[in-house]
Image (spheres, rainbow, N blue to C red):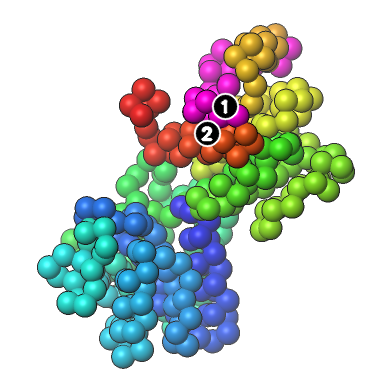
Amino acid sequence: MHHLDLQVIERALQWANQGLTVWLCTVLKTFGSSPREPGAMLVACDTGEYLGSLSGGCVEEDFIARLHSGEFAQPVQQVSYGGDNGPANTYLPCGGSLEVLVERLAPTTENLTHLEVMHATLLGRQPLTRCIKLDGSGKRFNPANNSEPAVTFDTNSVNIRIGPALRLIIAGISAISSPCALFAQSLGFEVIVCDPRDAARENFAVTDVEVQAVLPSVFIASGGCHANTAVVALTHDPRIDDLAMIEAVRTEAFYIGVMGSQQTSQQRATRLLRSGGLTKSQVARIAMPIGLNLGSKTPAEIALAVMADIVRLYRGKQRHTL
């Protein structure tokens, strides 16, 4: 799940707690080239405000217009966009098509509780599956795991997996940290920066980033990682980087990387095995040198290489296939 989806559910809760009915939209299927993937969400209220994204913009405008005309009065509806089954005046510029689930959620105790559980799941560690009856007769949560597809269908229901929002932990502040945080935000990551040094934190100014005045290893050891977390160490300072790696490999983080040349990476591997107490399999989890080999020189280019490698692994691509 992307951090945008967490913002969607937070806005849904805000509106519902104000007594407003909300419409929660979820992408169920995509065909061809579609901007968002199954599981992507949007929320709207009857004032016409909305947050989130289902496409590049045309779908959102059509949905709001149809909402104003009273088309989505049922508890659950499925809507198609693009292709032969979509509205005549709506198409996807990419030529693809998609199917969207629209849930009308009145501000009842039951719906508020459902949104609260979704919010806790996006902030937490364990994924859940929302099982929604397509006839609007009810919905429930079931246990899930991150290897399951985002959306599956049963005879009379749809199952939508939700899980922890993508998170990037930047271990230490350097010239690479700001562009890396900015790239990560644009990719839908929640970004947390950890650095105990006052001077370093004073030089870091990226909005909407959580900054922790602690050693990254302390934050990681306290439960800061889940299965959708990437950890990157960018300082060249072993006192920060090595400790962060020692703690990160003990977590479920899907990507762990540390900056350095081939030579310093080999030295670090030896150090982590000898004095860090790590096993060879644990050290093998660490991407070092970090990032794709793009020939990067500037801080922004290095940050791009780091985030590209994280996205590669998150999408299940092997380096040799690129």
Above or below, 33 relative to 45? above
Q: Amino acid at mark 1?
A: Ile
Above or below, 267 relative to 23? above
Are circles 2 and 1 on residues that touch, CB within 8 Å? yes
Q: Quadrant of residue 146?
A: top left
According to the picture, the residue beneath numbered tag 2 turns out to be 305
Residue appearing at x 76%, y 29% in the figure: 240
- Disc ID at residue 290: 1
Residue 193 location (% of width, % of height): 70, 44
Query: How dense is the environment of label 2, judged by Cα within 10 Å: few (below 14), some, or many (20 and up)?
Result: some
Q: Is residue 278 magenta?
A: yes
Furthest-right residue in this view: 198
Evaluate whether residue 320 shows in this view: yes
Q: Is residue 16 magenta?
A: no
Q: For this rendering, which residue is in front, 180 or 7?
A: 180
Give the side of residue 71 with respect to residue 294, left or right. Answer: left
Q: Quadrant of residue 134?
A: bottom left
Which region of the structure is painted magenta?
Answer: 275-297
Q: Secondary structure at mark 1?
A: loop
Quarter of the image for the C terminus: give it. top left
Residue 286 location (% of width, % of height): 57, 23
